[in-house]
Amino acid sequence: MKGMRNMELNKVDKKVEEIKSNNNIFSVGKVIKVNPYTVIVSGLNDITYYEEVNIADKAKGFVFAVGKNNITISLVEVNDKINPGDEVYSLKKQFKCLFSMDSMGKVIDIFGNDLIAGKRFDNLVEVPIENDPIPIMDRGLVEREFLTGITGIDMLYPIGRGQRQLIIGDKKTGKTQIALDAIVNQKDKNMVCIYVALGKTKKEVKQIYYELTKMGAMSYTIIIASFFDDLPAKSYVTPYAATSIAKYFMRQGYRIVCILSLLYCT
């Protein structure tokens, strides 16, 4: 028994040294409490908000709250059961999502997966979930209209480029259809459309994908989805990742429309 214990300890030490040698580790802590969507960790020092962590190669997440004696980790991906006592490795970077330029015309998630084809993209780049905002005085004026293709909106309640607009209403009143019609109307306008689907079922997202494909709009559209049964932290960071991707295309000279479709329940 003692020999087996020593072998296990040697394996752990070897793993820690391997991570250290790759310059990927900042500090090591231990799980002290496991909640459905978060874990409480002690022993991690000099850590910051949104810093990425690896939990014993079973899960990954980011720092959501820092307390006096412990921190709270929000889980974004879980591959195995987490137990109290599991080691938590703090990485030297802010949590980032993955994105590929091959995502155009696809339904993707924040980990660089093609959710329709069921495979991961190549040529992935890291996308931060937080960006410095453009100073107010450096922003341009809202001077040009954004045409949705819906006459009632464009004539009576026009939307300007650079403007945020809320579409609110009861269920089954056509909110999603307004958004989809606006995307379809951007064809041949040097526009990249990003549709963020939060809290929807896989069937609903597929219906949106097939409708936009039928209308010829997926050639300039990316759908970023977080389904209703995904971890809350994944849904939380998905809109941030979408806006970062939108900024990436903006810097390439494209016009951008980013639509956030949120299922909100009370």
Image (cartoon, rainbow, N blue to C red):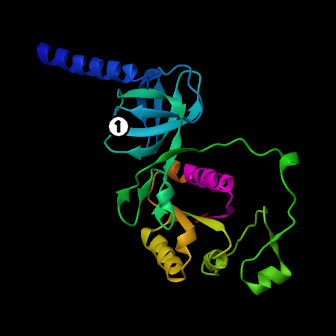
Q: Is residue 150 left or right of residue 261?
A: right
Q: Nearer the viewer, residue 227 or 113?
A: 113
Q: Residues within 10 Å of mark 1 (few under 14, many from 20)?
A: some
Q: Residue shown at 33%/22% (left/top)?
A: 18
Q: Quadrant of residue 121?
A: bottom left
Which residue is pictured at 51% across the width and 56% down the height?
A: 101
- Residue 238 in the magenta stretch? The answer is yes
Task: Between residue 43 and residue 138, name the one nearer to us.
Answer: 138
Residue that appears at 55% across and 53% down: 238
Return the residue at label 1: 82
Between 146 and 66, the one lying in front of the other is 146
Q: Secondary structure at mark 1?
A: loop
Q: Position of residue 104 (x, y in %)?
A: 51, 64
Residue 173 placement, left or right of 139: left
Q: Quadrant of the C terminus?
A: bottom right
> Main SS of the magenta segment?
helix
Q: Amino acid at mark 1?
A: Ile
Q: Which residues are magenta?
A: 236-259
Tell me, yes or no, if residue 227 can be seen here.
no
Q: Quadrant of the N terminus?
A: top left
Would you place residue 108 above or below residue 152 in this image? above
* Picture layout, residue 234 above or below residue 8: below
Classify 47 as above or below 166.
Answer: above
Q: Residue furthest bottom?
A: 151
Q: Nearer the viewer, residue 101 or 72?
A: 101
Quick check: is 219 in the magenta stretch? no
Q: Residue 119 at x, y = what percent?
A: 35, 58
What is the x, y in percent for residue 115? 41, 62
- x then y, percent, for residue 44: 49, 22
Q: Quadrant of residue 154?
A: bottom right
8 shown above or below 184: above
